[in-house]
C-alpha cells in the first residue's frame, strides 16, 4: 500500500531580485499547475525595480515576503522558514514550469514512498525579447537535459531539513553545495525523463553577471570532498 499525496500541501518558494521582466511569467507557470493545494511564497531580495508591484498584483494566491538584499540562498531560506507544506519546491524567478510538473513528481512520491527527492529534465530557451546581437552571444543547448537543480526539485520538507538550509555564504554554487550535502545524508532521489522546466537564458542570468564568483563552485566541491575524507577517517 502506498501513501496518497493528492491532498498534500506543496510550498513553492520563488526568490526574486530585480526580475520585473520575468517574475509575472514565473508565477503564472506555478498558478497554471494542474496540482492543488499550493502555497506560493515569493521572497523579494531587495529589488529596486518594479518587481514588488508586479508580485503584489497577484493578491492572496501569492505570499510576498520582503527582505534586504542578501542573495538567492538567503531568499530561498527565508521562504523555507515561512513555509507550511509537507513538500517543498523551488523556482527561479526567470524560469518556467510546465503545467504538469508537480503532478508528475507527486505521482512518483505516491508510487515510490521511499523516494525523498524528485528532479526532472529541463530545456533551455533564449528569452524572446532579446536583441539579435545579444541572443546570438548566448549559448543555448538544444534538447532535454537532466537537471539536478533547485528549479526542478520537489522534496519532502523533513528530508530538506535533514540536509539543512542553503549556504548563504555562497553567491553562486549554493545548489551544488546543497546537493552534495544531500548525497552525504543519503537522501533518496530520482530524475524524471520528462521536461518539466524551461530555463530562460538572457543577459542578466546570474551565471553571466556573477562570473567572478565562480570560485564558489570550487568551494562547494572542496567542502564536499573534505566531509567525505572526514567520514572515511572516522570509519
Image: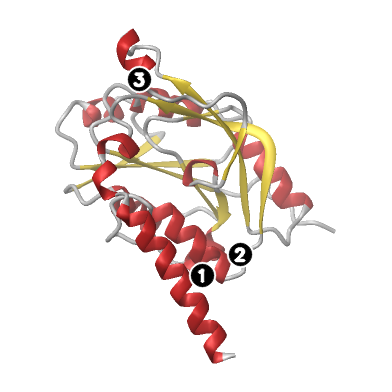
Q: Which mark is first along the chain, 1 or 3? A: 3
Q: Which mark is residue 137?
A: 3
The percent position of residue 200, horizontal first and vertical second, equals 43, 26
Which residue lies most toward the top here?
Answer: 132
Query: From the viewer's perspective, is residue 92 above or below residue 169?
Result: above
Query: From the viewer's perspective, is residue 4 above or below residue 158?
Result: above
The residue that label 1 is drawn on is 162
> Crowding near pointer 1: few (<14 within 10 Å), some, many (20+)?
few
Q: Which mark is residue 197?
A: none
Q: CA distance from mark 2 to mark 3?
A: 38 Å
Assign a secondary structure to mark 1.
helix
Look at 28% across and 51% down and name the residue there: 171
Quadrant for the N terminus in the image:
bottom right
Residue 178 picture quarter: bottom left
Do the residues under discs 3 and 1 have CB atoms within 8 angstroms?
no
Q: CA distance from mark 3 to mark 1?
A: 41 Å
Amino acid at each position: 500500500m502506498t501513501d496518497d499525496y493528492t491532498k498534500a500541501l506543496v510550498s513553492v518558494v520563488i526568490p526574486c531580485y530585480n526580475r520585473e521582466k520575468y517574475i509575472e511569467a514565473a508565477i503564472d507557470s506555478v498558478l497554471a499547475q494542474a496540482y492543488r493545494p499550493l502555497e506560493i511564497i515569493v521572497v523579494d531580495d531587495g529589488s529596486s525595480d518594479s518587481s514588488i508591484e508586479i508580485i503584489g498584483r497577484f493578491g492572496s494566491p501569492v505570499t510576498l515576503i520582503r527582505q534586504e538584499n542578501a542573495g538567492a540562498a538567503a531568499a530561498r531560506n527565508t521562504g523555507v522558514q515561512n513555509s507550511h507544506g509537507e513538500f517543498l519546491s523551488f523556482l527561479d524567478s526567470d524560469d518556467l514550469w510546465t503545467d504538469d510538473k508537480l503532478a508528475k513528481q507527486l505521482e512518483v512520491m505516491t508510487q515510490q514512498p521511499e523516494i525523498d527527492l524528485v528532479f526532472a529534465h529541463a530545456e533551455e530557451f533564449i528569452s524572446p525579447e532579446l536583441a539579435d546581437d545579444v541572443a546570438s552571444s548566448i549559448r543555448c543547448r538544444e534538447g532535454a537535459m537532466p537537471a539536478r537543480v533547485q528549479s526542478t526539485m520537489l522534496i519532502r520538507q523533513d528530508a530538506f531539513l535533514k540536509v539543512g538550509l542553503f549556504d548563504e555564504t555562497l553567491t553562486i554554487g549554493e545548489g551544488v553545495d546543497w546537493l552534495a550535502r544531500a548525497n552525504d545524508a543519503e537522501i533518496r532521489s530520482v530524475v524524471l525523463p520528462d521536461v518539466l522546466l524551461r530555463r530562460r537564458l538572457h543577459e542578466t542570468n546570474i551565471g553571466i553577471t556573477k562570473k567572478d564568483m565562480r570560485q564558489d563552485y570550487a568551494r562547494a566541491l572542496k567542502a564536499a570532498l573534505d566531509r567525505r575524507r572526514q567520514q572515511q577517517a572516522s570509519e
